[in-house]
Image: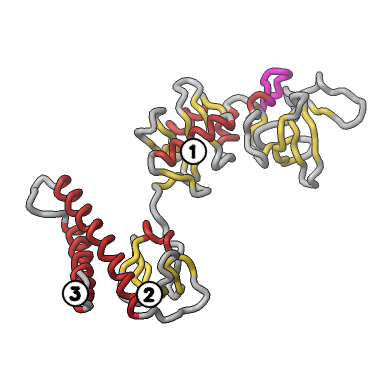
Amino acid sequence: MEIGNEIKGFNIAEALKYAPKGLKLYSPIFGEVKFEKIDEDNCVVVRDKYNNLRWFYEYGTYFPSDENNFSEGECLLFPSTNHRCWQHWQNTLFLESIGSVCVDTIMGNKFILDQNGTFFSDGTGSQYSTLIDCEDSSNYLLNSRYATPEEAKEFFEELEKNGYKWDGKMVVKSTSQPKFKVGDIIKHKDTGIINTIKKVCSEYYILDSDNTLYFEAQDMWELAASKVKPTLEEKVNILADEIIALKERVKSLEIQEIKQCSDKNRLDSIDWMRWKEGFSQYQKYANALTKRGIT
C-alpha cells in the first residue's frame, strides 16, 4: 500500500474540479466514498455509503459539520484504499473514470478514458489511437488533467466530425445502425407504402417485397400499427421512386469504385457484387414499369 500523508501538499479540489460525479475515492474515516462536487468554498464534497454528504478542505483535511476546525490535520481523502497518497494520482483516478475527457498538459491533446485504455487524438482530428494497458498509457496519464466542460464538448464534436462516437464504453467508428427488426411492419412517411422487414443484413434490410432498404434511408420509414395491403398504383409509385434511388446509387458506386481501383476496367469484387445486386433489382423494377407503360 502506497502512503503519503502530506499536509497541505496537494490541492485536491483543483485536481478534481472537473472530475465526474460518482468517481470513487477513499477516506480512512468513512471508507469508500463517491465524489459529488467542488463547492463554492473550494471544498471537496463526497457521499458516504449511507448517502450522506461529507466535506473535506481543498488539501484533504476533514471539514466536520459542527463548529470544530480540522483544517490543520492530516489529509484524509485519497484516490483509493490501496493508494493513500496523491503522488501519481492520475493512474488511479483516471482509470476509474470511464467516459471522462482529459487533456495532456504538455501537448494539449484531448483523450477519453476507454474501457480498453486511453483513446486520444493528435490534436488535429486527423489521427486517433488507443493505448491498451501499457506503460505508454500510464505515462500519458501522469501529465494529464480532467477536461473542462468546454474542452469535453469540443472533443465530442471533433469525434463526430471525423466519423467516431462514444458508445458508453469505448470510442467506435460511426456507422448507420438498424432501427427496425425482423417482423417489424414499416410505413413510408411520404407515400404511406407498407412493408415488413424480412431480413436484417449488415448495411440494409430485405423487405417482404424482396426490395432492399439501406440503413441510410431508414429515417424515411416508421413503424406501422398494422399491415395494410398497398394498391397496385401505390406499388408502381414506390417502384418508380426506388428506380430513381437505385440509378443514383449504381452510378455513385460505379464512379467511386473505378476511381479507387488501379485497374480502371474492374471493380473490387465485393462492391462489384453489391453493384450487380443493385443493378439486377433496377432491371426488375424497370421491366415491371415497362409492362405498365411507364418509362
Residue at point 68% right, 37% down?
A: 25
Query: Is there CB contact under 8 Å for labels 2 and 1?
Result: no
Q: Is residue 268 above or below residue 108?
A: below
What secondary structure is found at the residue carrying circle 3?
Answer: helix
In the image, the segment drawn in magenta is 1-13
Q: Residues within 10 Å of mark 3 (few under 14, many from 20)?
A: few
Counting residues from the start of the chain, the first of labels 1 and 3 encountered is 1
Q: CA distance from mark 2 to mark 1?
A: 36 Å
The tag on residue 156 is 1
Query: Is there CB contact under 8 Å for labels 2 and 3?
Result: no
Residue at point 72% right, 41% down?
A: 32
What secondary structure is found at the residue carrying circle 2?
Answer: strand
Identify the residue under disc 2: 198
x and y, in percent, of residue 263 in the image: 8, 48
Q: Answer with the quarter of the image where residue 31 lies.
A: top right
Q: Is residue 196 above or below residue 157?
A: below
x and y, in percent, of residue 272 in the image: 17, 59
Side (left or right) of 105 relative to 85: left
